[in-house]
Amino acid sequence: MGPVIMALKEKYGQEIVFIIADLGSGDPESEQLAREFKVYTIPAYFFIDATGALVATETGRLSLEELEVIIKEKLLAE
């Protein structure tokens, strides 16, 4: 897990569940998630709200600040 995700998990871990799929590990669960979400580009981010709705997707490297904007707007907005 990269430093950006670790920082986000530390800051928002009480409010948001982070699921990390390591596609290079050969882990069957990670491979299943990649198939289910049709991951073609790495990194890929999927933001799912408390109701289970997919509210945003992003691909490519994003900064801590960019990810925080999405988290605040899509997952923590009231």
Image (cartoon, rainbow, N blue to C red):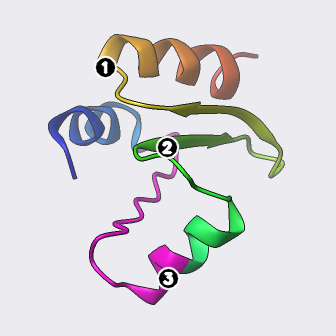
Q: What residue is rendered at 29% in x and 39% in y?
A: 5
Residue bearing the label numbered 3:
29
Residue type, numbered disc 1:
Leu
Q: Is residue 16 left or right of residue 20?
A: right
> Which is more N-terminal, label 2 or label 1?
2
| Residue corresponding to mark 2 | 44
Instruction: Kindly identify the amino acid type of the residue bearing the numbered disc 3.
Output: Glu
Name the spot of residue 39 as percent of width and height, x first: 58, 55
Looking at the rendered structure, which numbered label has been put on residue 64?
Answer: 1
Q: Is the magenta stretch mostly helix, strand or loop?
A: loop
Residue 1 on image: x %, y %: 22, 53
Labelled pair 3, 2 in contact (Cβ < 8 Å): no
Question: How far apart in space, not on screen, are marks 1 and 2 (Cα)?
Answer: 14 Å
Q: Which element is circle 1 on?
A: helix
Q: Is residue 28 magenta?
A: yes
Q: What residue type is labelled 2?
A: Ala
